[in-house]
């Protein structure tokens, strides 16, 4: 029996405030490659069967112009939309300026995904090995379970030299499964030392080998059911908080705490890089150039 191909959900509804433009559509070489191009290319090689883009309606034309022709006939593509008003009517807040975070983005894909799926950021380069490892894990996972997977990277390999970053710190149990994710929202490199900022503004040092989540998760469709209930409860508590965000790690932590499923932490040797700040672009351009020179990727991905 042929295994069902997993789906890749790409979160691409962010506004790129620290970057200064829509980084998910920015290009990093003369061939016009975005970071999304590499993720889709690697996902296709790894055995994924469908792409679901989570975007805003205002990006739709630009996204379709960028991806529809090059991906036509290669992999199925679907678009879903994360907007300020894609919440229950009673929770819509006109004063809010951005959607409700990664957990909210994931829920937008609910009606488009009926198979096991991975979810990633649009502005990160994850590497082929990561997609291969994840695809194999998703094909083995029971469609009706709450078991999940996470690709994890050492923190030191995910830091920007040009400002602070947010990362999910992984805590593992004695068997190597995920115990919890702690969201560190302000990690900065200072004099070769990594620190994160606590809620009171104080700094705490963190080891560079600490495993962190770069939002590369693998789930079953059962995850949507649980996340939807959590989101409604979250909105009841935070609907008037203009900065509150519903993160995927929050949902995962609740699944672990409820003992509904386990999360396998999949370590990868893939090279990770991404863009948070405009100055990160030079680093990404250099890394992509190196990979093409080594023939890890063809000069023209889609021809």
Image (spheres, helix red, strand yellow):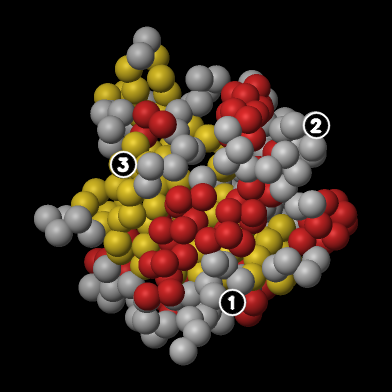
Residue 110 point in image, percent of width and height: 58, 75
Residue 174 point in image, percent of width and height: 12, 55
Q: Specify which label sits upstream in the sequence, 2 or 3.
A: 2
Q: Specify which label sits upstream in the sequence, 1 or 2.
A: 2
The residue positioned 64% from the left and 54% from the top of the image is 41
The circle on residue 30 is 2
Mark 1 crowdedness (10 Å alpha carbons): few <14, some 14-19, many ≥20 = many
Vertical placement of 33 versus 86: above or below?
Answer: above
* Residue 275 in sight: no
The circle on residue 113 is 1
* Nearest to the observer: residue 18 or residue 230: 18
Mark 3 crowdedness (10 Å alpha carbons): few <14, some 14-19, many ≥20 = many
Q: What residue is shown with label 3? A: 211
The residue positioned 61% from the left and 71% from the top of the image is 49
* Residue 61 in sight: yes
Residue 6 point in image, percent of width and height: 53, 72
Vertical placement of 62 versus 44: above or below?
Answer: above
> Residue 124's image quarter?
top right
Tell me the distance, in whole angstroms, between the alpha carbons under discs 1 and 3: 29 Å
* Nearest to the observer: residue 238 or residue 167: 167
> Residue 8's image quarter?
bottom right
Q: Tell me how many marks there are.
A: 3
Q: Specify which label sits upstream in the sequence, 1 or 3.
A: 1
| Element under disc 2 | loop
Tell me the distance, in whole angstroms, between the alpha carbons under discs 1 and 2: 34 Å
* Nearest to the observer: residue 205 or residue 68: 68
The residue positioned 19% from the left and 56% from the top of the image is 176
| Element under disc 1 | loop
């Amino acid at each position: 029996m042929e295994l069902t191909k997993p789906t890749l959900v790409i979160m691409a509804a962010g506004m790129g405030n620290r970057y200064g433009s829509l980084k998910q559509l920015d290009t990093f070489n003369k061939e016009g490659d975005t970071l999304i191009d590499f993720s889709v290319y690697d996902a296709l090689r790894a055995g994924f069967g469908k792409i679901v883009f989570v975007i805003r309606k205002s990006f739709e034309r630009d996204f379709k112009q960028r991806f529809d022709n090059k991906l036509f006939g290669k992999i199925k593509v679907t678009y879903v939309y994360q907007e300020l008003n894609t919440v229950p009517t009673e929770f819509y807040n006109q004063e809010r300026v951005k959607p409700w975070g990664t957990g909210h983005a994931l829920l937008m894909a609910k009606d488009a995904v009926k198979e096991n799926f991975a979810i990633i950021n649009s502005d990160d380069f994850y590497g082929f090995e990561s997609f291969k490892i994840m695809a194999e894990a998703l094909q083995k996972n029971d469609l009706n379970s709450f078991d999940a997977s996470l690709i994890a990277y050492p923190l030191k390999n995910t830091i920007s030299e040009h400002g602070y970053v947010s990362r999910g710190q992984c805590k593992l149990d004695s068997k190597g499964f995920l115990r919890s994710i702690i969201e560190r929202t302000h990690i900065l490199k200072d004099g070769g030392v990594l620190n994160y900022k606590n809620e009171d503004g104080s700094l705490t040092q963190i080891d560079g080998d600490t495993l962190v989540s770069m939002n590369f998760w693998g789930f079953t469709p059962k995850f949507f059911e649980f996340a939807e209930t959590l989101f409604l409860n979250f909105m009841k508590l935070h609907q008037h908080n203009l900065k509150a965000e519903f993160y995927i790690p929050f949902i995962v932590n609740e699944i672990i705490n409820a003992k509904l499923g386990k999360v396998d932490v999949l370590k990868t040797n893939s090279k990770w890089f991404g863009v948070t700040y405009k100055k990160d672009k030079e680093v990404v351009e250099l890394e992509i150039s190196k990979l093409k020179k080594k023939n890890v990727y063809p000069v023209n991905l889609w021809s």
